[in-house]
Image (cartoon, rainbow, N blue to C red):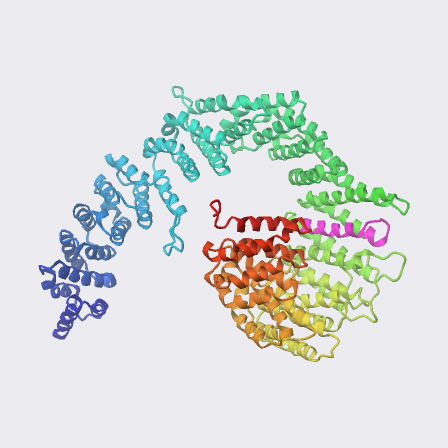
Amino acid sequence: MAAGSALLVGLVEEFVSGQQDSKAADTATGLKAGQFTILQLVEALGLHLASSQPQTRARGVQLLSNVLQQCHGDLTEREVEVLLVFYENRLKDHYVITPHVLKGLKALTKCSVLPPGSAVSILKSLFQDVHVQSLMLVERSCVYNILTQLMESRESELKGLGADFVFGFVQSVDGERDPRNLLLAFQIARKIIHGGYDLGKFTEELFEVTSCYFPIDFSPPPNDPHGITQEELILALRAVLTGTPRFAEFLLPLIIEKLDSDVQSAKVDSLQTLTACASVYEHKELAEFLPGLWASLRREVFQTASERVESAGLAALGALTACISRSVLNSDSEDYLNVFLDLVLKDCQHHLCEPDLKLVWPSAKLLQATSTASYRASHRVAAAIMPSLIEQYNSRTQCAQRRTLLEMLQGFVQPVKSSEEDESVLLDFRQSLCSIVFSALSEDSAGLQITSLRVLTALSQQTVLLLKSDVELAVDHLTRLILEEEDAKVSLAVVECAGALACLHPLAFISKMVPRLKEEIFSESMAQGDSAPLSQEHPQQAVRQRCLTALAAVSSRPSVVQESTPVLLQVLTSSHTGTGSFSLEEVISVCHNLQRIAEHAQDTEETGRVFHDIVIPRLLGLALQAAMQGSSDHQSPLVEESVLSAMVPVISTTCARLQSQLAGQTASRAVSLFLDGDMSFLPENAFPSKIQLLKKQAGDSWSQSQMVCLLMGCVCSLPRSVEVPQLDRLLLELEELSCTCDHPLSYTSAAKCYAGLVNKRPAGEALDSLIDRMLKRISTELDCSSSSVRTQAFTLLLWVAKALLLRYHPLSTALTDKLFSLLSDSELGLLAADGFSLLMSDSPDVLNRGCNADVRIMYRQRFFTENSAKLVLGFNSAAQERKSGYLKALSHIVNNLPRQVQLTELPALLPLLLEALSCPDQAVQLSTLSCLQPVLMDPPSALITQLEALVGRTLTLTTSPAMKVRIASLRCIHALSRFPEHEIMPFRARVLRALAVPLDDLKRMVRSEAVVARNEWFLLGSPGGR
């Protein structure tokens, strides 16, 4: 023990007298090891703590506090009690000691053995002996942390202080300016309010000490390491100010005052705070201030030019109305809601009678915000407003005025939150509203029709407002507009409205619209023959396109899907057999609309069965019939690559959404068809008994092998839980087809299908051996310069590399290294460079999350980190004529990285990117410029050192033969004007001279970009510049 005492004395001396701060850690270590106790440390510090020199006493307390910060969990209750007495006494000592005392108290408040009553003792000492705002920032933070810790661990003791605790906190925080400490102070104030502490007679003082910061105008400095944002402070203060109704008498006048501010952010903050108040307050807190609040809100909505202020004002009005609506009426109480609504109606209602004047819309918005706030308010507003609007609509003849009135009606038709037993507030006006809508749908004005369609959609959301006869009449109008209306905006509105109504009233669409659209689709196609006038062909195609789009839009419910999909499939059958003269574009449109149905229809087993039992078998059957069709006068469009490519998303979208059982059956059927020629599930099964779809066909025939793209749609989108049967055999056949077939769609689709299956295959020895075997075969073909299937082998390599890269498979490195080596290949170099764009971008039809592929987060960043050095090394060692491939690959990779990664990695890659701007390949130039432009908006220092090269090379590209390159280079020149003025001023005259050329460019888009860029450079250094 004597050795321990000697050690302790030595440590104390070295820390206090020797000024060796590291000895505090050694002392804490000895304490934890049991060489001495905390009280022995206090005893060893005795002479220093009793010194006449404040600095010596401060060093002694500092050592004790530093040790406590590390060892507070090892103390006993008796030790804590002794230390608390000591520290409370030290608060009366010299001011240089106070910071260290506070650190020690902060450590002690974390002790689990804090004696009862000690929390009160600590706070009384703090409040009496410490003037918090005279302390430095860190010490003030320490005080707030002590309060926070005690409020969490000794809440009942603090509440025993009553209002004295609130008064002490108010004194401590009064005058605080640092945002970090303010955040802590606001959190403490919020706990006081929500924790049930007694505010006593200090309610106003607590409000005043926090509301003096309202509204927050703090702007964090650039590169702030503390990360305190203005939004954080705003929300923390708002939680305090709106935390209790007792603040209402102080806060509401303050909000009214702040709404007179000219600062937009102050107005928005005030309005949002008012909205938050309304969810806490009751009507009695608001009653006195309603006239003043309404006057301020009305002024802000009537006079503001800011959408943010207007939106916040309307939200606040709705919240106020909802709050007042919650008041419980009795015989002798005043109906505050009616009083408030009288104010609103008095100031707004008369403006609605003047649809040409500017206050009509602000008034309408105010009334709509009030109306949608509560059921009671909507009844009162509707009763006052609706008769006038309906009468005006019927009496006015100008389309513009009627459209304005109809748009206002639309705002009042929106459903209001109410209990289920409440009837619609618009029930009395149902007939008049329906009459107005249907008459507007018959008008010639496109704007009137579009607005009426929106009103019809809003009416349909409230089931009691449209009777069965109204729904049927609406469907008739919609059908007529689909068939007759050529305006694109009207057609889009019709389709949206039909989709909304079909969700609610599917039977009306099944019985009326679907048959009529079917009739129109096929009557036009049958009537159209070789003798049809050319002038009629385009309008007829446009009508059919609208019919096809409408069929997809209304097919959200399974019952409608069962009726609409056969019509679309019949179009494909007709075009295949030649019985209807449908164009190739229309056939593709049918496929796109089938995909929309698969994507947007309700995800039910019933919908899944329609696609599983009918749509997919019919698509596969028709494609197979077309593929096996011999030479005849009619060539089926279903053998066209564009049609097959449009079929793939239909099948893949369906398979991705199928339930597990149906998905498994689909996989089994598709694999059996392509491997074994099993066509038993196909409709109209009149095929040869033996077909081999995955075998290379004799001669130049490719019609059957290209169907592998449909197999990809079937098996590559399935959930990962679904097992694909005969997987090993299927992969072998796909590998063979992709490496031997010379038809691009066939071998590319086979490679994509192979990659999609490999991506989902469980990791293990089987997968590794499969990849090794495939890589050996590919390498053999690629290494042989005379091989006729090098392109096919490269395609398979590229897609499998992507499949493995997405899932972080270890063997992906071997495949990507092979791709890097091909950048120097004379035949495949450019293909390999473009392949990196495919590696880094999202693929639409396979290997994406929508297809349930195994895609890990940040795979792009990982690939870049692991391979950027290889790319730079390859570029430096490549022959001059092969360097462009490396630049193109780099440009593709960097262009697909997130912006933050680009900013981080740019300094190292900048020389190569600048070299890429000099590359003759226009695709490289465009990709590099697209990568640089967002980085130039907030340039790192590395870019500023390369200004000469940047300016020179981008100016050269402003005269490029490619329009896109010229536009991209001008955008970069524009971005360069944001650099520090003293850095770019030397280039001003040169840039202005160079930009004179694109000002006369033949392309308007180029001229427009040149004007914007030149204006910015022209204003540099001038009084009107930035």
Can residue 74 be seen in the rendering of this structure? no
Q: Residue 78's image quarter?
A: bottom left
- Residue 787 locus on image (x, y percent): 74, 78
Q: Quadrant of the N terminus?
A: bottom left
- Residue 180 locus on image (x, y percent): 33, 50
Measured along the vertical axis of the image, is residue 592 above or below residue 512? below
Q: Is residue 448 magenta?
A: no
Q: Residue 478's image quarter?
A: top right
Q: Name the residue: 64% across, 29% down.
A: 403
- Residue 218 locus on image (x, y percent): 37, 45
Measured along the vertical axis of the image, is residue 609 above or below residue 2? above
Q: Residue 114's image quarter?
A: bottom left
Q: Is residue 585 magenta?
A: yes
- Lateral position of residue 139 relative to residue 769, left or right: left
Query: Nearest the camera: 259 or 908?
Result: 908
Can residue 886 be seen in the rendering of this structure? yes
Q: Name the residue: 60% across, 76% down.
A: 878
Count the marks. 0
- Lateral position of residue 548 relative to residue 292, left or right: right
Residue interval drawn in magenta = 573-598
Query: Nearest the camera: 855 or 539?
Result: 539
- Residue 891 locus on image (x, y percent): 59, 65
Q: Name the residue: 43% across, 26% down.
A: 295
SS majority, magenta: helix
- Lateral position of residue 669 relative to residue 244, left or right: right
